[in-house]
Amino acid sequence: MTNDIHKDVLPQLAKLAIDPHRPLIISDADEVLFNFMIGLEGLLASQELYFDWSSFALTGNIRRIADKQPISQEEVGGLLSEFFEHRCIDLPAVDGAAAGLKALSKHAQIIVLSNIPPKYAHHRVTGLKDKGMDYPLIANIGSKGEVVRHLTQGMSAPAFFIDDIPHNHSSVNIHAAHVHRLHYIADERLSALLGPAEHSHTRLYNWPEIEAHIIQHIETGAG
Ligand SMILES: [Mg+2]
């Protein structure tokens, strides 16, 4: 069933060749592979804005330096477009992410599933290559569960999903419950604002932990 996968995402999925007998790791990008918040703070500072670190959300926490008032949801959307167009290409990689994925690639297939607007996907591809993480990218629109189900259907090997946002874990739990879900938030300031995602299997705190956890699951046959 693919009705709930966006029409701009389906052709990207069709290009992938997934081996059903080899473990599959589906990794988010922002706050998993890239330091999104560090990049966002740079953009905010350039526009007389700041993030107030009071909760795990963008809307409501991005405020004007001048009057400390939050900007609107619409303005946050505009900022994110600007971010993906001009800033995501140069985002720093999360400590240990490239080495972790490289080690895991000896055991598993790797796909990056990022909700970057498809028109900016080429910037993300460049960023991944520049940081030693040249793995296939799906530029997704909307929730991730249906896409993860599509990617993992018919697989006999275990599949893993890594993401910072709790509702993405909930979506995967609904549509692809067989996938092992790892909750990870790279930015320690952001991580401190949120407990484990309700629908994740485990919360992990750095890439060496992620690598060890996945390898252990693959070697013990648990999925
Ligand atoms: Mg993310």
Image (cartoon, rainbow, N blue to C red):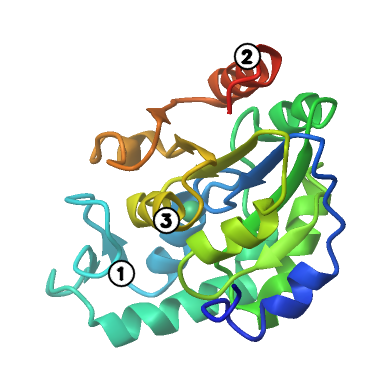
Q: Residues within 10 Å of mark 2 (few under 14, many from 20)?
A: few
Whether the residues at callouts 2 and 3 have beta carbons within 8 Å, the answer is no
Against 76, residue 15 (above or below) is: above
**Image location (x, y in percent) of residue 202:** 40, 28
Question: Where in the figure is residue 118, as x and y percent of width and height?
Answer: 66, 78
What whole-number distance in Å separates the C-alpha atoms at marks 3 and 1? 28 Å
Q: Is residue 78 visible?
A: yes
User: Which residue was labeled with disc 3?
Assistant: 168
Q: Is mark 3 within 8 Å of ligand 1?
A: yes
Q: What type is the residue that disc 2 sits on?
A: Gln
User: Looking at the rendered structure, which numbered label has been put on residue 176?
Assistant: none
Q: Residue at x 73, y 33 (%)?
A: 101
Characterize the local packing of mark 1: few (<14), some (14-19) or many (20 or more) Cα atoms within 10 angstroms.
Answer: many
Q: Secondary structure at mark 2?
A: helix
Q: Secondary structure at mark 1?
A: strand
Residue assigned mark 2: 216
Q: What's the residue type where badge 3 is placed?
A: Asn
Which residue position is annotated with label 1?
Answer: 49
Dot 3: element: helix
Q: Is residue 121 left or right of residue 88?
A: right
Q: Residue at x 75, y 27 (%)?
A: 104
